[in-house]
Protein backbone atom coordinates (compact mmCIF):
# COMPACT_ATOMS: atom_id res chain seq x y z
CA UNK A 1 0.00 0.00 0.00
CA UNK A 2 1.31 3.48 -0.88
CA UNK A 3 1.00 6.51 1.35
CA UNK A 4 -1.34 9.26 0.16
CA UNK A 5 0.24 12.62 -0.59
CA UNK A 6 -1.29 15.16 1.85
CA UNK A 7 -0.71 18.03 -0.63
CA UNK A 8 -2.46 16.27 -3.53
CA UNK A 9 -5.62 18.07 -4.66
CA UNK A 10 -8.92 16.41 -3.94
CA UNK A 11 -11.47 15.62 -6.61
CA UNK A 12 -13.62 18.49 -5.36
CA UNK A 13 -10.74 20.98 -5.71
CA UNK A 14 -10.05 19.76 -9.25
CA UNK A 15 -13.74 20.13 -10.19
CA UNK A 16 -13.80 23.63 -8.68
CA UNK A 17 -10.69 24.64 -10.65
CA UNK A 18 -12.21 23.17 -13.83
CA UNK A 19 -15.35 25.28 -13.26
CA UNK A 20 -13.29 28.44 -12.80
CA UNK A 21 -11.31 27.77 -15.98
CA UNK A 22 -14.53 27.06 -17.91
CA UNK A 23 -16.15 30.31 -16.73
CA UNK A 24 -12.98 32.25 -17.55
CA UNK A 25 -12.91 30.77 -21.05
CA UNK A 26 -16.55 31.78 -21.52
CA UNK A 27 -15.83 35.34 -20.47
CA UNK A 28 -12.84 35.53 -22.82
CA UNK A 29 -14.98 34.23 -25.68
CA UNK A 30 -17.67 36.82 -24.89
CA UNK A 31 -15.07 39.60 -25.05
CA UNK A 32 -13.84 38.20 -28.36
CA UNK A 33 -17.39 38.02 -29.76
CA UNK A 34 -18.96 41.14 -28.28
CA UNK A 35 -15.88 43.28 -28.11
CA UNK A 36 -14.69 45.12 -25.06
CA UNK A 37 -17.95 46.70 -23.89
CA UNK A 38 -17.48 50.19 -22.58
CA UNK A 39 -13.99 50.51 -23.99
CA UNK A 40 -15.24 52.76 -26.78
CA UNK A 41 -16.32 55.35 -24.24
CA UNK A 42 -13.03 55.04 -22.41
CA UNK A 43 -11.10 55.45 -25.66
CA UNK A 44 -13.09 58.59 -26.50
CA UNK A 45 -12.50 59.99 -23.02
CA UNK A 46 -8.77 59.30 -23.26
CA UNK A 47 -8.72 61.02 -26.66
CA UNK A 48 -10.54 64.04 -25.23
CA UNK A 49 -8.17 64.10 -22.27
CA UNK A 50 -5.18 64.08 -24.61
CA UNK A 51 -6.66 66.97 -26.61
CA UNK A 52 -7.42 68.92 -23.42
CA UNK A 53 -3.89 68.36 -22.14
CA UNK A 54 -2.51 69.69 -25.43
CA UNK A 55 -4.68 72.80 -25.16
CA UNK A 56 -3.65 73.24 -21.55
CA UNK A 57 0.01 73.02 -22.57
CA UNK A 58 -0.54 75.68 -25.24
CA UNK A 59 -2.35 77.90 -22.73
CA UNK A 60 0.50 77.44 -20.27
CA UNK A 61 3.11 78.39 -22.89
CA UNK A 62 1.08 81.47 -23.89
CA UNK A 63 0.75 82.53 -20.27
CA UNK A 64 4.48 82.10 -19.68
CA UNK A 65 5.31 84.10 -22.82
CA UNK A 66 2.98 86.95 -21.76
CA UNK A 67 4.44 86.87 -18.23
CA UNK A 68 8.01 87.04 -19.58
CA UNK A 69 7.08 89.94 -21.89
CA UNK A 70 5.50 91.78 -18.97
CA UNK A 71 8.72 91.41 -16.96
CA UNK A 72 10.79 92.62 -19.90
CA UNK A 73 8.55 95.69 -20.24
CA UNK A 74 8.85 96.41 -16.51
CA UNK A 75 12.65 96.17 -16.70
CA UNK A 76 12.69 98.56 -19.67
CA UNK A 77 10.39 101.01 -17.84
CA UNK A 78 12.58 100.94 -14.74
CA UNK A 79 15.63 101.66 -16.90
CA UNK A 80 13.89 104.63 -18.51
CA UNK A 81 12.77 105.92 -15.10
CA UNK A 82 16.36 105.72 -13.83
CA UNK A 83 17.66 107.64 -16.86
CA UNK A 84 15.06 110.37 -16.29
CA UNK A 85 15.94 110.51 -12.60
CA UNK A 86 19.66 110.79 -13.34
CA UNK A 87 19.06 113.49 -15.98
CA UNK A 88 16.84 115.41 -13.56
CA UNK A 89 19.41 115.13 -10.77
CA UNK A 90 22.25 116.30 -13.03
CA UNK A 91 20.11 119.19 -14.32
CA UNK A 92 19.24 120.28 -10.79
CA UNK A 93 22.87 119.98 -9.72
CA UNK A 94 23.99 122.13 -12.64
CA UNK A 95 21.23 124.65 -11.95
CA UNK A 96 22.32 124.94 -8.29
CA UNK A 97 26.08 124.91 -8.81
CA UNK A 98 26.42 127.14 -11.90
CA UNK A 99 25.55 130.43 -10.10
CA UNK A 100 28.15 129.60 -7.47
CA UNK A 101 30.73 128.84 -10.13
CA UNK A 102 30.04 132.20 -11.77
CA UNK A 103 30.41 133.98 -8.43
CA UNK A 104 33.60 132.10 -7.52
CA UNK A 105 35.29 132.54 -10.89
CA UNK A 106 34.58 136.31 -11.09
CA UNK A 107 35.91 137.20 -7.68
Image (tube, rainbow, N blue to C red):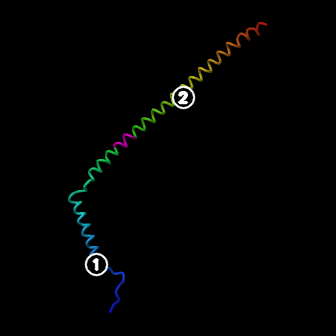
* Quadrant of the image containing the C terminus: top right
20 and 70: which is toward the camera: 20
The label on residue 59 is none
Q: Which residues are magenta?
A: 51-56
Q: Please state which of the two labelled residues, at mark 2 or mark 1, is closer to the viewer.
A: 1
In this picture, residue 67 sits left or right of residue 82 = left
- The alpha-carbon separation of the residues under discs 2 and 1 comes to 83 Å
Q: Is residue 77 magenta?
A: no
Q: Position of residue 92 (x, y in %)?
A: 66, 15
Q: Main secondary structure of the magenta part?
A: helix
Q: Is residue 53 magenta?
A: yes
12 and 97: which is toward the camera: 12
Q: Is residue 52 above or below residue 15?
A: above
Q: Which residue is mark 1?
A: 12
SS class, disc 2 = helix
Q: Is residue 102 above or below residue 64?
A: above
Do the CB atoms of the residues marked 2 and 1 lie less than 8 Å apart?
no
Q: Which residue is mark 2?
A: 75
Residue projecting furthest to the bottom: 1
* Quadrant of the image containing the N terminus: bottom left
Q: Position of residue 18 (x, y in %)?
A: 26, 73
Q: Position of residue 84 (x, y in %)?
A: 59, 20
Structural crowding at the residue carrying mark 2, measured as other residues with C-alpha within 10 Å and reported as few (<14), some (14–19) or many (≥20):
few
Q: Quadrant of residue 4?
A: bottom left
Q: Residue at x 59, y 23 (%)?
A: 82
Amino acid sequence: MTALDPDAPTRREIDQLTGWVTRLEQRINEVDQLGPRGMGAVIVQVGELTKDMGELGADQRNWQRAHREQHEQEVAQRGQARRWLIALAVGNFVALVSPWLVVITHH
